[in-house]
Image (cartoon, rainbow, N blue to C red):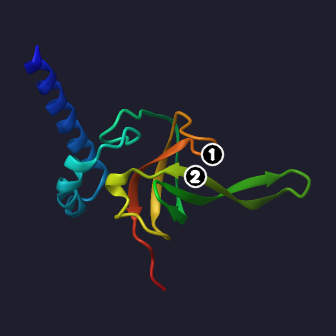
Amino acid sequence: MNKKKTDTKTKKQKEGKAKLAEIMPAKEAGKEATAIAECNDRNCPFHGRLRTRGRTFEGRVIRKFHKRITVEFERMIYIRKYERFARKKTKIHARLPECVEKQVSIGDLVQIRECRPLSKIIHFVFVKKIKDKEEK
């Protein structure tokens, strides 16, 4: 019986590594080998038990906190009265897992995905980094 439990853990760890390799570029996935063993975050979509579902957004990181980021993205809405489109900005707070906290910085383009409510304001989780900050 103990043998099955260890097999299950190793299987989950392998799945986590595979997910991490899909999400991060190959050069960063090698760096994360040490973080994989250290990640004990229950609310991590790669190593923990947090399941994602529903909507997915891409946007820029405008603020970064410990275990949380604020992502902002623009969308176009139609104003019927003026028969024109207007740009609106939306800010969403997302959970930032500890295992990828060092790779994400302000100005990066990231993808976030909906999950169960983690707190009063956090209903999304970081999924992958798309692009680094663009220098001017």
Q: Residue at x 35, y 43 (%)?
A: 41
Q: Where 70 falls versus 54 (above or below)?
A: below
| N-term-proximal mark, 2 vs 1 | 2
Residue closest to the far bottom:
136
Q: Nearer the viewer, residue 20 or 8?
A: 8
Q: Quadrant of residue 103?
A: bottom left
Q: Are marks 2 and 1 in contact (CB under 8 Å)?
A: yes
Residue 24 % position (x, y): 29, 55
Q: What is the spatial separation of the Cα atoms under label 2 and label 1, in whole angstroms? A: 6 Å
Where residue 80 sits: x, y (%)? Answer: 87, 50
Residue at the top extreme of this rendering: 1
Secondary structure at numbered mark 1? loop
Residue 20 to residue 27: above or below: above
Q: Which residue is mark 2?
A: 93
> What amino acid is found at the position of numbered circle 1 in the picture?
Ile
Please state the horizontal and vertical placement of residue 101, each as a whole percent of the image. 38, 59
Comparing 135 with 37, the one in front is 37
| Amino acid type of the residue tagged 2 in the rendering | His
Look at mark 1 in the image and give the residue it sits on: 121
Circle 2 Cα neighbour tier, 10 Å, few/some/many (<14 / 14–19 / ≥20)? many
| Residue 12: quadrant of the picture | top left
96 left or right, relative to 54 = left
State which quarter of the image contains the N terminus.
top left
- Find numbered disc 2 in the image and state the secondary structure of the residue it sits on: strand
Viewer-nearest residue: 116 or 27: 116
Where residue 37 appears, x then y in whole percent?
Answer: 19, 47
At 44% from the left and 73% from the top, the residue drawn is: 133
